[in-house]
């Protein structure tokens, strides 16, 4: 690893350009923008190669995208080393331009946005509940031959607030597929740009804001592919902003209420509830204050978590797909789950998939409890310690929990890690960010 990093620095400083005499942030950012613009040519090549699917299928195009993203990541690393407060605004402008360019690029490597569209149409066009009825029941829909995919056989696994927002967009776009796609993407791009300024607001650190803004993997997943994780992250960041402010009843209520909205987009941020509770209880002085904080925190969260479900409530069956997701088996699992699959299979264990998954998830639960206990017992009750423990929880979550782990799931980990580095103004662990970004990109070599 050390020799690789030495080679990387040599390549950066000597082969491509002499940073001290030739290159500056503007030069690198222009090269970065030029490389990002190459995504515009993917769809013309897709048609030239005879790839007629609604998203990419041709392996050569996947390889091109991986190579392009890795190259952009190289320049992304350079921007971090060169950025100054003076060049920060230029960097943000480049990021906004990239978001706008990517907004008008058709989704490339994921069909999730089409799933958002047809699950919204179950409500708007057919008046049915997507938690109860799946899209394959509506083969007469004019979009069905175009956007039908494997998820059409399943009920919705997305949060109720996201479905309600999708319903509004579907009402506006009606039977125009292109408008449906670009309305969803416009929402995601807007949230992605808002996240840049939220990170700047929380950390008061321009480097962290730029690390988020120019991260090529985040740009690709949010602005091109269009994943609703960006909305979960937006509400999570907004919640953390209120946590970082002076502790009072108003900010506690806002922090938990907005965290609930994040969880009703996508459920991952439910993991933050105990960490928030521990943090606020730790900084409360008297026993009465601690009990009061506990009550208003849980009441605020539950109120805003439950309300969006009221519209869709039809009994416990609305959670069926969440249960099915937990039992799904895939080669795209968390690293430790995959390791246990191999170990248990070689040991001749019956149902090695199930045993491996349960073993790994039990380990995560234990680590999760230990992380919360550690935050409770630590003498340091500063906000940065909460951020540190949030990052630890998400690392453990993605390493141990999933039997179905998609690359874009890691966006919340990347974001919170950037937030932690920015708030502490300690970028010595930036290498982990580079590695995590590359690791998130590489699965597209095999993912179809």
Image (cartoon, helix red, strand yellow):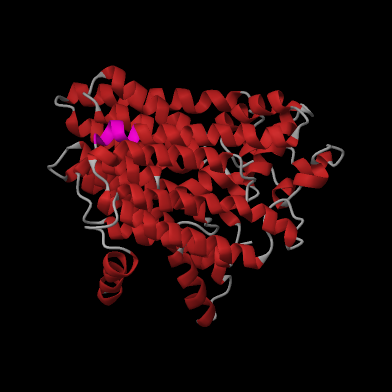
- The structure residue drawn at horizontal position 74% and vertical position 48%, both measured from the top left corner, is 153
Q: Is residue 339 left or right of residue 424?
A: right
Q: Position of residue 193 (x, y in %)?
A: 44, 34
Q: In which image quadrant can residue 130 be found?
A: top right
The number of callouts visible is 0
Q: Is residue 16 left or right of residue 281?
A: right
Q: Which residues are magenta?
A: 198-204
Q: Is residue 320 left or right of residue 18?
A: right
Q: Nearer the viewer, residue 359 or 334?
A: 334
In this view, the residue farthest toward the left is 379
Q: Is residue 439 left or right of residue 253?
A: right
Is residue 212 one of those drawn in magenta?
A: no
Q: Position of residue 263 (x, y in %)?
A: 47, 35
Q: In which image quadrant can residue 260 be found?
A: top left
Q: Position of residue 338 (x, y in %)?
A: 49, 69
Is residue 199 one of those drawn in magenta?
A: yes
- The structure residue drawn at horizontal position 57% and vertical position 33%, both measured from the top left corner, is 186
């Amino acid at each position: 690893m050390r020799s690789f990093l030495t080679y990387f620095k040599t390549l950066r400083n000597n082969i491509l350009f002499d940073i001290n005499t030739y290159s500056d942030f503007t030069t690198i950012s222009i090269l970065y923008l030029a490389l990002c613009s190459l995504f515009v040519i993917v769809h013309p090549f897709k048609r030239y190669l005879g790839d007629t699917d609604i998203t990419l299928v041709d392996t050569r195009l996947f390889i091109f995208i991986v190579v392009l993203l890795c190259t952009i990541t190289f320049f992304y690393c350079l921007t971090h080393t060169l950025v100054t407060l003076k060049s920060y605004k230029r960097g943000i402008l480049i990021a906004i331009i990239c978001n706008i360019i990517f907004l008008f690029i058709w989704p490339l490597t994921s069909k999730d946005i089409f799933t958002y569209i047809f699950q919204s149409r179950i409500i708007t066009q057919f008046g049915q509940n997507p938690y109860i009825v799946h899209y394959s029941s509506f083969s007469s829909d004019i979009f069905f031959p175009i956007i039908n995919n494997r998820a059409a056989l399943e009920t919705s696994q997305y949060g109720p607030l996201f479905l309600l927002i999708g319903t509004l967009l579907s009402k506006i776009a009606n039977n125009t597929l292109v408008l449906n796609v670009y309305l969803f993407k416009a929402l995601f791009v807007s949230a992605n740009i808002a996240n840049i300024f939220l990170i700047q607001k929380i950390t008061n650190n321009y480097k962290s804001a730029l690390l988020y803004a120019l991260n090529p993997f985040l740009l690709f997943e949010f602005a091109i592919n269009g994943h609703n994780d960006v909305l979960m992250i937006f509400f999570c960041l907004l919640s953390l902003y209120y946590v970082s402010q002076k502790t009072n009843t108003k900010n506690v209520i806002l922090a938990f209420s907005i965290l609930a909205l994040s969880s009703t987009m996508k459920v991952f941020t439910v993991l933050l509830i105990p960490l928030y509770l521990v943090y606020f209880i730790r900084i409360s002085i008297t026993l009465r204050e601690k009990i009061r904080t506990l009550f208003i925190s849980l009441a605020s969260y539950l109120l805003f978590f439950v309300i969006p479900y009221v519209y869709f409530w039809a009994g416990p069956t609305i959670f069926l797909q969440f249960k099915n997701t937990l039992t799904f088996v895939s080669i795209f699992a968390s690293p430790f789950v995959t390791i246990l699959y191999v170990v248990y299979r070689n040991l001749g264990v019956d149902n090695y998939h199930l045993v491996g998954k349960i073993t790994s998830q039990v380990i995560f639960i234990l680590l999760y409890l230990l992380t919360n206990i550690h935050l409770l017992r630590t003498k340091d009750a500063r906000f940065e310690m909460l951020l540190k423990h949030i990052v630890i929880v998400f690392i453990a979550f993605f390493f141990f929990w999933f039997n179905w782990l998609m690359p874009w799931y890691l966006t919340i980990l990347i974001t919170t890690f950037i937030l932690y580095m920015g708030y502490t103004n300690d970028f010595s662990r930036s290498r982990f960010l580079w590695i995590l970004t590359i690791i998130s990109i590489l699965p597209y070599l095999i993912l179809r």
